[in-house]
Amino acid sequence: MSESRNAAQTGTRHYRPETRLVHGGTLRSQFGETSEALFLTQGYVYDTAEQCAARFANTDPGYIYSRFSNPTVSMFEQRMIELEGAEAARSTATGMAAVTTAILAPLRAGDHVVAAKAMFGSCRFVVEDLLPRYGITSTLVDGLNLDDWQKAMRPNTKTLFLESPTNPTLEVLDIAEIAKIAHKGGARLIVDNVFATPIWQSPLSLGADVVVYSATKHIDGQGRCLGGVILSSNDFIQEHIHNFLRQTGPSMSPFNAWVLLKGLETLGVRVRQQTENAAKVADALAKHPKITKVIYPGRSDHPQAATVKKQMRAGSSLVAFEVKGERAAAFRVLNGLKITRISNNLGDAKSLVTHPTTTTHQRLTPEARAELGITEGMIRFSAGLEHVDDLIEDLHGALEKA
Ligand SMILES: Cc1ncc(COP(=O)(O)O)c(C=O)c1O
């Protein structure tokens, strides 16, 4: 089995996504195994010193060390490449390692980054707190306002970063228009596609240059392991990402890559069912007297419904809603749920609820949260695979206590 890591291996691209999810990137050993093999090895041995030297000189294709190349990890990367329509990919230990690497690796002191204010708290830490320590300035904008993006551009702007739908307010940002602003200014656009999943949104086809995922979410989707992946052009991955990961080492473990490969096989059916459940939960919540607001990208009353239609193939498995009565009422709802569990995670087979103000977005000031529309009464609901009637009854039961 040889190291085959990039666009050369495009085996399933001509098939539909469901087929790519099951077969993309599979490498078989001499034993002809059905399921992808788990190569739980740190390193590799060489037949001769000459072969070893050639491997390091890059003249003999093959694996060297699992910090930067491993057959099981390659299979995961290749399956993601074929699903996303990218040229190349590299995977990381967590989603945050993917976000941090994609943003930081290509930049130098003196560069400037523009990012949408509404984003996951740790991503905001990277942009707002970490980058400036290394002389990289950043401007946060209202991601929905294209003029804001345009006005923030400077001659030294190298990267624009956004997530859409956003965490947790489910705003939908216009990826194609923001990509145009980036490219006009000579910058790249990086999209964190976690909330949309590769099933419902393909940022590269909308003009983005780089896509990042926390594979921890829907790609695993069964609460087992963490992971991340960066997808882009061959040039971007080779020039900026491969060497950074090789030398600094936030690598995905082969075991996690194997779990995630198995996760990809069922990603399509899971995300479809979770989205169907989320849509029904959103409709049920919208009718409830104790709910003041429901935000769901699949509903016609979503504030960016036109953008959803333009760039997403369906809504999302996430719903945000607000209960009357602020934090105490929100906590009573969370504590009253029996099937849906309290967690800061999302995208799981088990339905999960989060109170963003006190968890994922607790590091923001109250003013910053207010600006983003993250209220004390807001709850984020991540739909799982349970029967939707049980989920709705569970929510209704908990709302009685609100
Ligand atoms: C939008 C978004 N991006 C990135 C991450 C980070 O992923 P991980 O937890 O795998 O590091 C998360 C996790 O919560 C997220 O919600």
Image: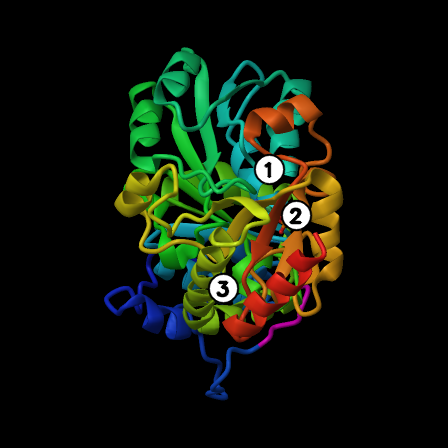
* Foreground of the two, 243 or 360: 360
Q: Residue at x 47, y 45 (%)?
A: 295
Dominant secondary structure (helix, strand or loop) of the stretch shown in magenta = loop
Q: Is mark 1 within 8 Å of ligand 1?
A: no
Pointer 1: what residue? 100
Let me know if residue 223 is in the magenta part: no
Residue 345 x/y as whole percent: 65, 55
Q: Amino acid at mark 2?
A: Pro
Q: Earlier in the sequence, mark 1 or mark 3?
A: 3
Rendered view: 393 above or below 58: below
Q: Amino acid at mark 1?
A: Thr
Q: In the image as oriented, which residue stretches furthest toward the left? A: 14
Q: Amino acid at mark 3?
A: Phe
Pointer 2: what residue? 250
Pointer 3: what residue? 76
Residue 308 x/y as whole percent: 33, 44
Q: Residue at x 29, y 35 (%)?
A: 176
Tell me if 315 is positioned left or right of 251 in this view.
left
* Foreground of the two, 377 or 143: 377
Mark 1 nearby-residue class (10 Å; few <14, some 14–19, many ≥20): some
Q: How far apart are the two marked residues, 1 and 3, measured between alpha carbons?
A: 20 Å
Residue 173: mark: none
